[in-house]
Amino acid sequence: MAYVKKCPDCKGKSYSASKKKWVCPYCGEDLKKIEANRAKN
């Protein structure tokens, strides 16, 4: 299952199979406090 988070700083979307440590791949912001949603197909 994949999850998606939207970075509040750069507005970029990132995807992961884990909800653990999560850093925005675009700006490096720590996203651990942002709620993860299931990615839609």
Image: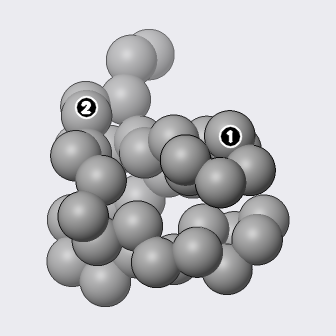
In the displayed structure, 22 sits above or below 39; it is below
Please tell me the numbered disc located at residue 28.
none
Specify few, some or many for label 2: CA neighbours under 10 Å numbering under 14, 14-19, or 20 or more. Answer: few
Q: Nearer the viewer, mark 1 or mark 2?
A: 1
In the displayed structure, 21 sits above or below 27; it is below
Say whether residue 12 is left or right of residue 40.
right
Picture quadrant of residue 40? top left
Question: Which of the two residues, 20 or 11, is positioned nearer the viewer here?
Answer: 11
Q: State the scheme by which the image is colored.
A: one colour
Q: Which residue does the numbered mark 2 point to in the structure image?
A: 38
Q: Position of residue 39 (x, y in %)?
A: 37, 29
Q: Position of residue 35 (x, y in %)?
A: 22, 46
Q: What residue is shown at x 28% (from left), y 71% (from top)? A: 32
Q: What residue is shown at x 25% (from left), y 45% (from top)? A: 36
Picture quadrant of residue 9? bottom right
Give the position of the N terminus as an image quadrant.
top left
Q: Upstream in the sequence, badge 1 or badge 2? A: 1
Give the position of the C terminus as an image quadrant.
top left
Question: Which of the two residues, 28 or 18, is positioned nearer the viewer here?
Answer: 28
Q: Amino acid at mark 1?
A: Lys
In the displayed structure, 20 sits above or below 19; it is below
Say whether residue 26 is left or right of residue 2.
right
Q: Position of residue 30 (x, y in %)?
A: 46, 78
Q: What residue is shown at x 25% (from left), y 31% (from top)? A: 38
Q: Mark 1: which secondary structure?
A: loop
Say whether residue 2 is left or right of residue 7.
left
Specify few, some or many for label 1: CA neighbours under 10 Å numbering under 14, 14-19, or 20 or more. Answer: few
Q: Which residue does the numbered mark 1 point to in the structure image?
A: 11
Q: Amino acid at mark 2?
A: Arg
Q: Mark 2: which secondary structure?
A: strand
